[in-house]
Image (cartoon, rainbow, N blue to C red):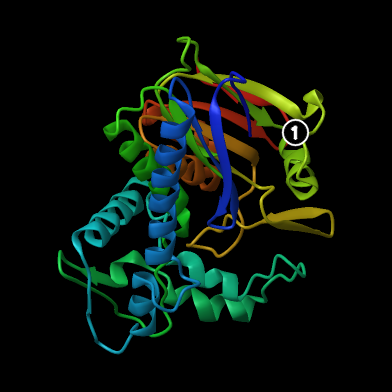
Amino acid sequence: MTISASPLDYGVQFVAMASDCEVRLAGVAAARAQTLAALAIAEVQRIETKYSRYRTDSVVSRINVASGNGASIGIDAETAQLLAFATQLFALSDGLFDATSGVLRQVWDFKTGRKPSPAQLKAVLPRIGWSHVQWNEQTARLMQPGMELDFGGFGKEYAADRAATLLAEEGVQHGLVNLGGDIRVIGPQADGSPWLMGIRDPREAREARKARAARPEGAVIASIPISAGALATSGDYERFFIADGERFCHILNPKTGWPAQHWQSISVIAPICVAAGAMATTAMLKGPDALAFLQGQDVSYLAIDADGQILRSD
């Protein structure tokens, strides 16, 4: 993702949630912008600390450790809100967006290019299922042994929304929060023009990140102007391997355990980032039904199919 902006903007780059991130502000004095950016970054870091499955002291890890033993873990209002959101996503996606599907990473190895055997998939699939999550406003528990809750499917998007909301509450009228390409916009640029988001060619995006350098302009496959709302992209290029001429990506179908196919990437514009990200991922899993799904949700999108053809909403 590239962002066209004025050289007078104030921007801070940082790393969070295993992603390159940025807070960009416009129309704010430099000293004030530094304070505001630090506030936004602290909020992103707070959410990562609280919900990362990689931290043994996180809420998610405490719930996961207790899976199947009958114990309920105390939760706060924010966690209950995220569980409610995950419940809504499960229903909206017809079960394709399932926050318990993270256990599939135990049988898929995208670093070494290892596919699971049928027996491995058969063993892990019963540990997936949102119906086995019991929760209320005060507690949560996973009913099946070995189940795992994972907010990774919308964690960055939620953090982008929270950070942008804090900035808006502090009076920011022109800016954005970009967490690894999941972007929440706070009004247009200072001159009133929209932020121009460049969508990179999915077949070059991974190499661009590895090089940590700008790619040639030809690597930007499309541009999207945004003055408000959010943009999120889901694609088959983040983590993948190729075996026997077939691409296997990290977006996994919780019903079958196999990767999404049909689309190279799908970008969605929505009022908030969690909605944009969830719909982009669900659309990837919908395969040939993706565009009908997005049209039914009344959101704008830009999709790149397996042949590299661009399909976009009006």
Can you say whether 283 is above or below 125 in the image?
A: above
Residue at 38% x, 37% y: name it: 164
Q: Is residue 17 left or right of residue 108?
A: left
Q: Nearer the viewer, residue 220 or 41?
A: 41
The spot of residue 125 in percent (x, y) is: 49, 73
Residue at 15% x, 69% y: name it: 138
Q: Residues within 10 Å of mark 1 (few under 14, many from 20)?
A: few
Residue located farthest toward the left when viewing the structure as drawn: 137
Can you say whether 44 is above or below 271 in the image?
A: below
Q: Is residue 173 left or right of residue 37?
A: left
Residue that label 1 marks: 307
Residue at 25% x, 87% y: name it: 70
What amino acid is found at the position of numbered circle 1 in the picture?
Answer: Asp
Q: Is residue 270 left or right of residue 16?
A: left
Residue at 53% x, 29% y: name it: 10
The spot of residue 189 in percent (x, y) is: 48, 17
Q: Is residue 162 visible?
A: yes
Q: Nearer the viewer, residue 215 or 32?
A: 32
Q: Nearer the viewer, residue 220 or 21?
A: 21
